[in-house]
Amino acid sequence: MNNTIQDCDLLLTGGSVVTLDDERRVIEPGAVAVSGARIAAVGPIEELAGYRAGRTIDCTGHAVLPGLIDTHDHLFQGMARGLGEGMPLWTWLTDFMWPFSISINLAEGRIGAKLGAVEALKAGTTTVVDNHYAPSDLDTTLAVAGAIHEVGLRGAVARGITGEATDIARRFDLAGELFRYSNDEEIEITRAAIEAYPAGGRVEVWPAPLNIIYNDQDLVRRSVALAREMGVGWHTHCSERLEDPPTYLEEYGVRPVEWLYREGLLGPEATIAHGIYLDDSEIEHVGETDTGIAYCPISHQYIGLGVMRMADLRASGAPIALGTDGPCCNHRQDMFEVMKQAILLQRVHTLDPTISNGEEALEMATREGARYAGVDAGVLAPGKLADVIVVDMRSPHLTPRHRTVSTLTYCVRGSDVSHSIIDGELVLENGVCTKVDEAEVMAEAQARAEELIDRAGLQGLLTPWRHDGSG
Ligand SMILES: [Zn+2]
């Protein structure tokens, strides 16, 4: 239908194109044309026959879809992958994660982020919200942002803010060395980091009061004000444990998300990890304000937290997205696995196989993730940012393929991703990162991680077999 020749930079042609657009078109075989950082055209091959591309990638036997958006992660945790097994959340924090976190130095923070970014990229993630809190000094925060940028991922470094310890933090022994900065210093450091990685760049910095339950209320207000002033998102953990809302209610006389709502702190720039224990009225507030919620089904199971009210939250209209939640409570960053678990956990919890489906998982991992993160991507449509992944479907575990959407959500593994394009740039080619040397990153991460575990005094966690069942 298009006889005139049009130039584009990159043409992905011949694959099953799963657009996630408003009509949810699946075009088999289809093509995607990319010009600069944006998608120029999407359609059946013959419709794009007039495109003359600087580079053409034959996607026959592959699926082409929007890049996956990991909306809650802690990349640095990869340095302790596999440790800290079988503990309740706050013990896991006080006995493992926080002693580990406060021991990390700048070089370890940087290589941990780089390793995590490489892992995520190779598994089809194109945007990551990295809730970085260890260590959270300015130089390390900037080094983490730089590492993500170097690998080529899009993302936000949501800088963890603890500030001055609250009564709740003290009462539950959470107020250790992680609470090292005054409230003023937290805001100053975050502001300086945002100035270095401002709104609109491929990597941004956001304020992230670490947890509404044990953060100072005024520090939360100031963090949100800073985000609004600088035009970036903000991030937090909230209501992930059954005890969280009652603890908050007892201390402040109000449930945590109810408090955020009354204070005018919810909104499209607010992104909350977990939100498992929200009551009906809190869900209504989240929907009314377009507040993002990150559903992390694997960490919810790993730490035994509970099951998010996915159907009710999605029905509220809020952007409900998916997250891996960091390599110490997921152990790998594979959003395909997260999609599958997101569906299955809802089904076993409700004993209802109709409560969730693969189409929803793909929506949460792409277009809803983009709404959540404030990124103009998540959909294959002209004008959208060219954040696109290509999945090689020519494997026994993906054969026969009857419905591409089912194959993507139930059968594909992150390692099946062959190409990734971010901002129009080819950052993963035939499964290999184009911008960094993966072997070098792994070697440095292994060496530095061993030193770090030693220095953090966590040798006790290295026991080859746990006979007593404790961490
Ligand atoms: Zn988390």
Image (cartoon, rainbow, N blue to C red):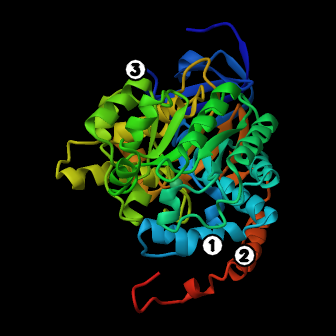
Q: Secondary structure at mark 2?
A: helix
Looking at the picture, how far across and down is residue 303, in whole percent?
A: 41, 65
Q: Is residue 207 left or right of residue 25?
A: right
**Residue 45 seen in the figure:** yes
Residue in front for this viewpoint, 307 or 267: 267
> Which residue is the site of mark 3?
23
Which numbered disc, 3 or 2, marks the residue that appears first in the sequence?
Answer: 3
The amino acid sitting under disc 2 is Leu
Depth check, front residue: 273 or 55: 273
Question: In this image, 289 relative to 376: left or right?
Answer: left
Asked if residue 205 lies left or right of residue 234, the reply is: right
Dividing the picture into quadrants, the one containing residue 219 is: top right
**Among the two numbered marks 3 and 1 on one chain, the one whose residue lies closer to the N terminus:** 3
Q: Are marks 3 and 2 in contact (CB under 8 Å)?
A: no
Mark 2 CB within 8 Å of ligand 1 = no
Give the Cα distance between marks 3 and 1. Answer: 49 Å
Q: Residue furthest bottom?
A: 467
Q: Does 328 sit left or right of 281 as displayed?
A: right
Determine which residue is flagged by label 1.
99
Separation of marks 3 and 2 at Cα, in angstroms? 50 Å
